[in-house]
Image: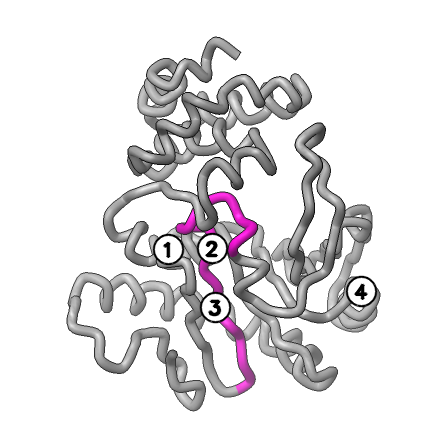
Amino acid sequence: VIPANRSRLSPVNFQDTQLIGVLARAESTVNSLSGLLSGLVDKFSARGHALYLVGGSVRDALLGRLGNDLDFTTPARPEVVKEILDEWAETVWDTGIAYGTVSAVYKGQQIEITTFRSDSYDGQSRNPEVIYGDNLEGDLVRRDFKVNAMAIELKEDGFEFHDPMGGLSDLQNKILDTPDKPEISFHDDPLRMLRAARFTSQLEFAVDDGTRNTIAELRETLQIVSPERIQAELVRLLQTDDPVRGIRVLVETRLIDE
């Protein structure tokens, strides 16, 4: 838990200087967005809703390489999010609103805001039954990997770092592991198995041994994923600086056979 009265992301009694450095880098990155996002944070606060930078955006902030696409989550329902963005952003589109996502562009920055979710899958399709959640931890546990299950709460007087799944430790150790049991995570969305391979190349991380074994066991479930989504994920893998790392995961788990 981090004091909200200062823009501090580092825990009070942190002893690991390497992790302090990682958090300080994230703090610097988020601070650079303060001018852009302060008005948005104010509007959510005025409505009584929290706003969190989340997922890959937090991971990349910790790695010091935040991109132009920012992902957020909030307890506010999609119609409220759209009302706020209509007041704040230059362009707003709601093509993903059925899944709780509203997108916008403001001063050249693209953002996506998704309402807390705790989805339900039937095992026959990647498309979940969207169920809105009421807490941050429930939203984070549904995500693909722990390193993508961290959040930074943006407040009017500072930031607060949330890591209930232990993503920061995995990031430090360069490990990819799922927030939930891997058999649950991959059963919900088999495309995550391909993402594991891609992230090994993109981030230069290794897949946790138990997670890797589960990929090998569940590889045939990839058949429920559309060819187009598989192709897109493979292209993203091949566009990384070191695609061999990811291809090796595909071969060793026999996911490549699917």
Q: Residue at x 28, y 56 (%)?
A: 169
* Mark 4 and mark 3: Cα distance apart in space: 21 Å
Q: Which residue is mark 3?
A: 152
> Residue 149 at what x, y percent from top left?
47, 55
Label 2 close to label 4 by CB (< 8 Å)? no
Q: Residue at x 35, y 22 (%)?
A: 249
The disc, 2 or 1, on the residue closer to the chain's N-terminal end is 2
Quick check: is 147 in the magenta stretch? yes
> Residue 232 at what x, y percent from top left?
59, 24
Q: Residue at x 60, y 61 (%)?
A: 72
The disc, 1 or 3, on the residue closer to the chain's N-terminal end is 3
The answer to whether 20 appears left or right of 89 in the picture is left
How packed mark 4 is, by other alpha carbons closer than 10 Å (few <14, some 14-19, many 20 or more), is: many
Q: Which residue is mark 2?
A: 149
* Mark 1 and mark 3: Cα distance apart in space: 13 Å
Identify the disc placed on residue 167.
1
Look at discs 1 and 4 and give the one toward the viewer.
1
* Mark 2 and mark 1: Cα distance apart in space: 6 Å
The disc, 2 or 4, on the residue closer to the chain's N-terminal end is 4
Magenta stretch in the rendered image: 141-156
How packed mark 2 is, by other alpha carbons closer than 10 Å (few <14, some 14-19, many 20 or more), is: many
